[in-house]
Amino acid sequence: MDVVSILRIAIRALARNKMRSALTMLGIIIGVGAVIAMVGVGQGARTQVQQQIAAMGSNLLFVGSGTVNRGGMHMGWGQTKTLVYSDMQAILRECPSVANAAPGSGTSNQVVFGNDNWATRINGTEPQYFDIRSWPFAQGTSFTQGDVETAANVAVIGETVRKNLFGATNPIGQTIRIVNLPFKVVGVLAPKGQSAAMGDDQDDVVFIPINTLLKKITGDTWLRYIMVSAVSREGSYAAQKQIAALLRDRHKIRPGQDDDFFVRNLADMADLADQAGSVMTLLLASIASVSLIVGGIGIMNIMLVSVTERTREIGVRMAIGATEGDVQWQFLIEAVVLSVMGGTAGIILGVGSCYLIAQTLEWPILISPLAIAVAALFSSAVGVFFGYYPARKAARLDPIEALRYE
């Protein structure tokens, strides 16, 4: 008997018990749909985290002043005063894997415009900082290197500061006050959103020239951090080693002594986030796959019942010339048809669920063609695996005993 004839008989047999067939497929439908939806949620979250990390800057390294030990208590980062502007110049000069660098320091203070005020971070840096961070401008431009050298009172503000101080007013050219000093707003940065690394609002910030901050506001002579851009993602690891070796030498740190600085590589953070995202996606898919196994057990159960109900039919087929292989193929194809039909409906349910989650809960969703293909193949494999035993049992029935069965 050819496969097409067996397939036609299988579909006819399943159609005789439409409700039972539909309920049997339900486990596969739920399983496949759950796998696709859970993988979509996991990969969407993973992609969003990677985008947030990428938004912080390309091939970025963060060199920060380190901690100090006071009375046996280690203070937080930024407490040492050994990281200076000449360190940044040496990094640019002596580290071949470094493409660019910008100094940085900061404080927190009230920013006033008219009758409105807002507490925010005041960061001092140089113009190349915005290129290193891949941070475009929504309005205006950056301050210049000449502004840095003359310690000019100019400022670039983030989107959060703009909304809270200016509302619908155009901030470019307006004057804000920081520590009773007037600053002219020359630029507004495009929104970056929440930081994947620290969880803080990246747009809640005001940038001013580094010399203006150090000379007129904080009075410091050291830097809290240096932002560094490596020549490539792969080169960031070499840059990290070169910077660490250079600063240990410049700060005269002897072997065995702790560093008075730290170098954080965003590539490490991206890799860690990617691994965590992969584990979460795998975990969600594994949990959802349990439904597929339950659905497969349901197929086996129904096929065993079907063999019992159709024992006499099997005997008649064998009596008129059907082989064991024909009978086995018939029941195996019935099981596969159940699982394939259930898998197809499950794919539709899973894709629909992804769009529903994205629309109602506003979660990031990424529908993976690979996940759909794997779910479809897995559902077919479930039909073959759980349908084999009932098919084999049907094929081994004694034709004489089968004909006598009532």
Image: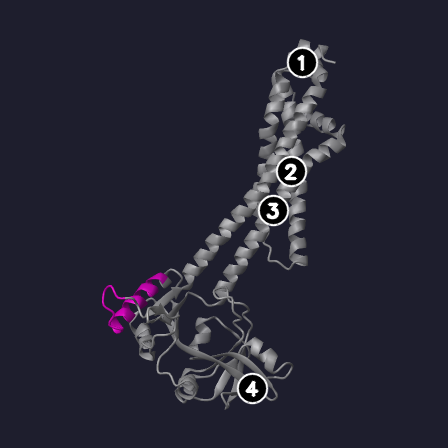
Q: Earlier in the sequence, mark 1 or mark 4?
A: 4
Name the amino acid type tagged 1.
Met
Quadrant housing the C terminus: top right
Q: Earlier in the sequence, mark 1 or mark 3?
A: 3
Q: Which residue is mark 3?
A: 36
Q: Which residue is mark 2?
A: 28
Name the mark nearer the viewer: 1 or 4: 4
Residue 390 is a magenta residue: no
Q: What colour-coding does the image apply?
A: one colour
Left or right: 60 with respect to 285?
Answer: left
Q: Give the magenta part as a residue range.
A: 237-257
What percent of the width, then of the height, locates residue 237?
35, 61
What percent of the width, then of the height, locates residue 123?
46, 79
Q: Earlier in the sequence, mark 3 or mark 4?
A: 3
Name the amino acid type tagged 4.
Val
Quadrant housing the N terminus: top right
Q: CA distance from mark 1 to mark 4?
A: 93 Å
> Residue at coordinates 42% horizontally, 88% vertically from top-left?
216
- For mark 1, give the secondary structure: helix
Asked if marks 1 and 2 touch (Cβ < 8 Å), the reply is no
Q: Which residue is mark 1?
A: 318
